[in-house]
């Protein structure tokens, strides 16, 4: 009996350890906010300040956006035009489904199978932005984000992303020089994260979306990159609702589904969810203990647990031998 309890405890500790290890990066996102890499407003010239042209511009002047085809819907034409108007000297690339696939096939053929295999189109829209930033460099902007001022000051940072709520970074506006190591890691890791994660929303978030990029960002930073290799972070006060903000946000996400509401509900009630999670977990452990490990009374009626004094692992193997034998007959 003693031995069983020890095995039981070891297994429990191992499972818990594995679980914590698996979500460690996720947990760390709750504590790391990227403020050490913040692009502070103090270092950004005001809109229209002549100081802007005195700063180095390392990111090439290219704006990337994505859509299914060339017919951008009416409600996104305003934000799209606002970026075009403010950047007449930038090259503009709209990555349609067709162009994206051709580009991956030509430049990153090792990724084509994963790219084609994604069950959700938004995963391709997520992935393509990392590839074009890696290949051409430039600035990627979601179609539902408009521009509020020239992005020129942001060309000074070799790689930047935006902070998002509740945690981590977003992939809706990002800038990079070509072949920055962060975006190299972002494209290289995509095949590994191409898994189903229970709900479509989580699958999209964790396989290619903001959650994916946040996890990659944490892994990337744990190698302690220095200087130009660091990814700079644009904080909300720098990007929304102010005259000095770079972007304006327009609602119109094309992929909000029921499970988004579920996730947001879960995020709001995470204490409750955690308590329920622990309750369910310990109940399960309790069940396992009762079924497999708890000593049975010797005078109990004969049942399939009659041989319960045999350790559960032996019992299982005995059972399969029995089944095998029967099969042979
Ligand atoms: C572009 O895609 C939209 C949405 O699927 C579709 O309604 C429209 O007909 C397409 N336009 C062209 C020119 O193929």
Image: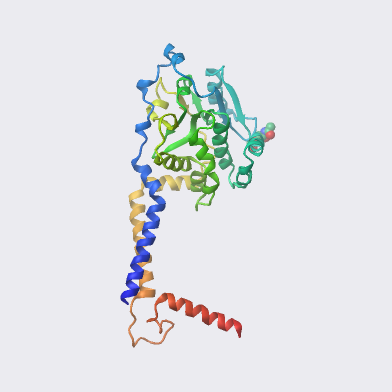
When asked about the image quadrant of residue 35, the answer is top left
Image spot of residue 103 (x, y percent):
64, 35
Q: Which residue appears at 52% of the width and 44% of the height? A: 189
Q: Which residue appears at 66% of the width and 39% of the height? A: 105
When asked about the image quadrant of residue 109, the answer is top right
**Can residue 145 be spotted in the picture?**
yes
Image spot of residue 173 (x, y percent):
49, 31
Left or right of residue 208, residue 234 in this image: left
In the picture shown, does residue 312 fall above or below 264? below
Name the image quarter holding the N terminus. bottom left
When asked about the image quadrant of residue 227, the answer is top left
183 or 149: which is nearer to us?
Answer: 183
40 or 305: which is nearer to us?
Answer: 40
Which quadrant does ligand 1 occupy?
top right
Most extreme residue toward the top is 50
Q: Which residue appears at 35% of the width and 66% of the height? A: 10
Name the image quarter holding the C terminus. bottom right
**Can residue 250 be spotted in the picture?**
no
Image spot of residue 247 (x, y percent):
46, 25
Q: How many tags in the picture?
A: 0
Image spot of residue 19 (x, y percent):
39, 56
Which of the colour schemes (rainbow, by chain, secondary structure, one colour) is used?
rainbow
In the picture shown, does residue 162 fall above or below 189? above
Q: Which residue appears at 52% of the width and 80% of the height? A: 321
In the picture shown, does residue 314 fall above or below 176? below
């Amino acid at each position: 009996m003693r031995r069983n309890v020890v095995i039981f405890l070891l297994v429990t500790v191992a499972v818990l350890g594995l679980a914590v290890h698996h979500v460690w990066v996720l947990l760390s996102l709750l504590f790391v906010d990227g403020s050490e890499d913040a692009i502070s407003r103090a270092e950004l010239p005001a809109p229209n300040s002549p100081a802007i042209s005195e700063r180095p511009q390392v990111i090439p002047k290219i704006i990337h956006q994505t859509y299914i085809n060339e017919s951008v819907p009416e409600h996104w034409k305003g934000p799209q035009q606002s970026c075009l108007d403010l950047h007449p000297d930038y090259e503009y690339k709209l990555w349609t489904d067709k162009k994206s696939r051709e580009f991956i096939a030509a430049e990153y053929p090792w990724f084509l199978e994963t790219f084609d295999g994604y069950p959700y189109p938004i995963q391709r829209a997520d992935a393509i932005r990392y590839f074009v930033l890696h290949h051409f460099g430039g600035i990627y902007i979601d179609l539902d984000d408009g521009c509020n001022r020239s992005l020129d000051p942001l060309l000074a940072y070799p790689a930047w992303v935006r902070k998002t709520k509740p945690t981590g970074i977003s992939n809706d506006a990002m800038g990079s020089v070509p072949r920055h190591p962060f975006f190299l890691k972002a494209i290289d890791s995509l095949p590994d994260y191409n898994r189903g994660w229970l709900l479509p929303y989580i699958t999209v978030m964790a396989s290619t979306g903001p959650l994916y990029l946040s996890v990659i960002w944490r892994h990337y930073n744990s190698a302690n990159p220095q200087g130009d290799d660091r990814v700079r972070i644009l904080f909300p006060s720098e990007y929304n609702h102010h005259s000095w903000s770079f972007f304006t946000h327009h609602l119109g996400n094309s992929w909000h589904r029921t499970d988004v509401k579920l996730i947001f509900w879960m995020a709001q009630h995470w204490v409750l969810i955690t308590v329920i999670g622990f309750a369910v977990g310990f109940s399960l452990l309790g069940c396992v203990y009762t079924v497999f490990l708890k000593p049975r009374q010797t005078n109990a009626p004969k049942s399939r647990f009659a041989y319960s004094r045999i350790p559960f692992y032996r019992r299982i193997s005995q059972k399969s031998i029995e089944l095998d034998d029967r099969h042979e007959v």
